[in-house]
Every structure is written in structure tokens, then in C-alpha cells.
Image (cartoon, rainbow, N blue to C red):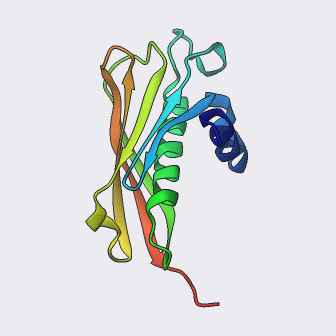
Amino acid sequence: MGRGAFSLAVALRAPYFLTIAPTVVELRPNHAAVRVRKWWGVHNHIGTVHVIAVANGLEMAMGVLAEATVPPHLRWLPKGMELEYLAKSSSTLLATADTDPSDWEHPGELPVRVQATREDGTVVVRGTIRLHITAKPSQ
């Protein structure tokens, strides 16, 4: 599938992602990047990308990373999110999520590093999305 079709399929699983007009631009184990388009539907009162739209992009990046990375005997569930707002989101953004291979070795809490970057390279939001990793129940 192309990027657009794949991104639409992901967003249809969690329809609120459609509001950010996402495109998955990179996906491999332990890394994902999602483009969050700057358009009027995600603007705040000053015409920049609303921070909740940014958070949705970061959550989508984390989610596709988790699906691409989680070992078959484990499952994941978001547990919390801590974000720092560093600069105005005045352009289309690249939302990235990263983990280390060793993070997925055992059940427990897993911190996923996330950040959103403007087209000029400025990081506008940085933080962590914590996942709760557990063993899949036996069938």
C-alpha cells in the first residue's frame, strides 16, 4: 500500500486521528514518523497547530511504532503522557516516536520518547508517552 492508503487505514481504526490529516512517512521497529498537516481544522485561536492536535500526532506515531515493535507474546496500552510545549507550531509538523530494542524485552512500564518538529527543524513539543506492557493472556 502507499503511504496515503496505509495512513488512512491506521486513522480509520482510531477515527479521531483523521482530524490531523496524518501521513505515516516512516515506520520500522523502534521508530515511527507521522506528518501532521497544518490546516484550518487544527488551528487554535492564534492560527498555529493546536497542541492537542500535536498530541494526537505524537500518539499516532507511538501507536504505529508499538504495533510494529511489540513482540508477539506481549501487548501494550497507553498509561500516560507528559509533554513540554517549547515553541509555536506554525507549520506542518513531523511527529516522531522512538524506543530502544531493549525496552521491549520484559513486561512493565515502557517510556516512548516523542517529539514534534516544525519544517524549519525547530522542536515544538517534546515528551514521553508511557506504555503498560503485559503478557498476552493464553487462549
Q: Quadrant of residue 21?
A: top right
Residue drawn at x 42%, y 49% as measured from the top left: 81
Residue 7 percent across, percent down from the top left: 63, 39
Q: Residue at x 49, y 18 (%)?
A: 92
Q: Quadrant of the C terminus?
A: bottom right
* Residue ranking furthest to the bottom: 138
Q: Hey, which quadrant is residue 86 in on the image?
A: top left
Residue 107 position (above or below residue 112): below
* Residue 44 picture location, percent across and down: 56, 17
Q: Quadrant of residue 90?
A: top left
* Horizontal side, residue 51 vs residue 127: left or right: right
Q: Residue furthest front?
A: 1
Q: Residue furthest top?
A: 46
Q: Nearer the viewer, residue 33 or 3?
A: 3
The image shows a total of numbered marks equal to 0
**Residue at position x 60%, y 35% in the image:** 3
User: Measuring 68% from the left and 34% from the top, which residue is drawn there?
Assistant: 18
2 or 99, which is in the foreground? 2
Going by the image, does 87 lie left or right of 47? left
Q: Quadrant location of the N terminus?
A: top right
User: At which x and y percent is residue 121?
Assistant: 30, 19
Q: Point out residue 61 in the picture as x, y percentages from the top left corner.
A: 48, 44
